[in-house]
Image (cartoon, rainbow, N blue to C red):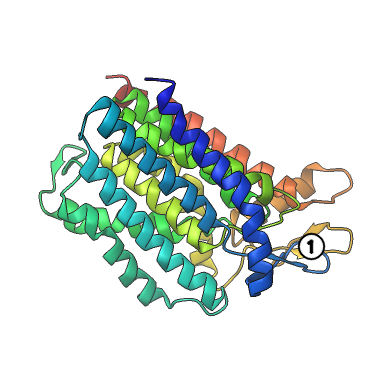
Amino acid sequence: MKVLLLTPFLISFLVVLFMVPVWIKKAKKAGLMGKDMHKPHKEKKAEAGGIIVLLGFILGILIYIAIKTFYIQSTENLVEIFALLVVILITALIGLMDDILGWKIGLSKKTRILFLIFAAIPLIVINVGESRMMGIEFGLLYPLFFIPLGIIGASSTFNFIAGYNGLETSQGILILSALSLLTWLTGSSWLSLISLIMVFCLIAFYIFNKYPAKVFPGDVLTYSIGALIAIIAILGNVEKIAVFFFTPYILETLLKVRGKLKKESFAIAKKDGNLQMPYQKFYGLEHVAIYLLQKIKKNKKVYEKEVVYVINIFQIIIIILGFILFRGGIFR
């Protein structure tokens, strides 16, 4: 049975691996292109490649459901899984609208929040999660307030740390891998498998999205990954440690608020690809990474992939600290 459960991972990985090149060609023909902001000539690359990741993910989930239904002969957690899929599809649609309209126009903040509240409804109506947190019983307040808050918060902020080749994809791989291990250790193996299916999809996509990128994920993927992180946390009742894993995004949000949500995380790209600070102050972790690298490196030259490495290392440190600080709640 264990070998059979590897099928969703393998199929999802292969679908993304072989379909992304097709999407790149189609996106170019359709003019669905975005500027690569940290290249000297700002060349354009295929946008919204996250659609293929979602295709691979949904197919992997359906294969997993088929294995549960026909081989294991179990319908346990199927309602939660289908609710999860509906939430992901709605958030993906919201992200796709942003991608089509363009990141400079996109949906208004109020409209986006309204749509994301709608996206949380599948989880609300099945009343998932535990309403008792930190010793307090929240009752109906949990599904009616905290679930929408989690979906809105994670979905809308996951794309804050973005704009650098491979950054969003690698961050998704790290956080969802950590959540997969966490849910496995806490007895929610089905959530662990779902997390890993997305991880395998993201690994395949990363091959094309890493520096120098051939395709960008788009909001269609970043909103979906953020939503999936929130859903895993809610269904697995691991909200506290999941929020801790999200520390870089909380810091990023605070820095964005400092800039009144108008300052961008992009840097100034020189002719040789060297990145310079766009502002005198920090308005994103990307700016902090550039500043630190300039202080450390003798030649003071900072490149795009180095910024991604620094942020990923920071995320790994946060994940390790999370497992250490919350180990009492994990191994119980």
What SS does tag 1 mark?
loop
Q: Does residue 260 sit above or below 282 in this rendering?
A: below
**At x 38% / y 53%, what residue is drawn?**
227
- Residue 308 point in image, percent of width and height: 67, 47
- Residue 273 point in image, percent of width and height: 84, 58
Is 132 positioned to the left or the right of 108 in the image?
A: left
**At x 43% / y 61%, what residue is drawn?**
92
* Quarter that holds the N terminus: top left
Is 129 positioned to the left or the right of 307 in the image?
A: left
**At x 40% / y 20%, what residue is drawn?**
2
- The answer to whether residue 261 shows anywhere in this view is no
Name the kind of residue labelled 1 in the image.
Lys
* Quarter that holds the C terminus: top left
- Residue 143 point in image, percent of width and height: 18, 53
Which residue is more in the foreground, 314 or 164? 164
Which residue is more in the foreground, 156 or 20? 20
Quarter holding residue 66: top left
Q: Does residue 83 sit above or below 129 in this rendering?
A: below
Is 247 positioned to the left or the right of 15 in the image?
A: left
- Residue 15 point in image, percent of width and height: 55, 45
**At x 59% / y 70%, what residue is drawn?**
263
Binning the other alpha carbons within 10 Å of mark 1 as few (below 14), some (14 to 19) or many (20 upward) gives: some
- The answer to whether residue 36 shows anywhere in this view is yes
Q: Does residue 225 sit above or below 110 in this rendering?
A: above
Disc 1 target residue: 39
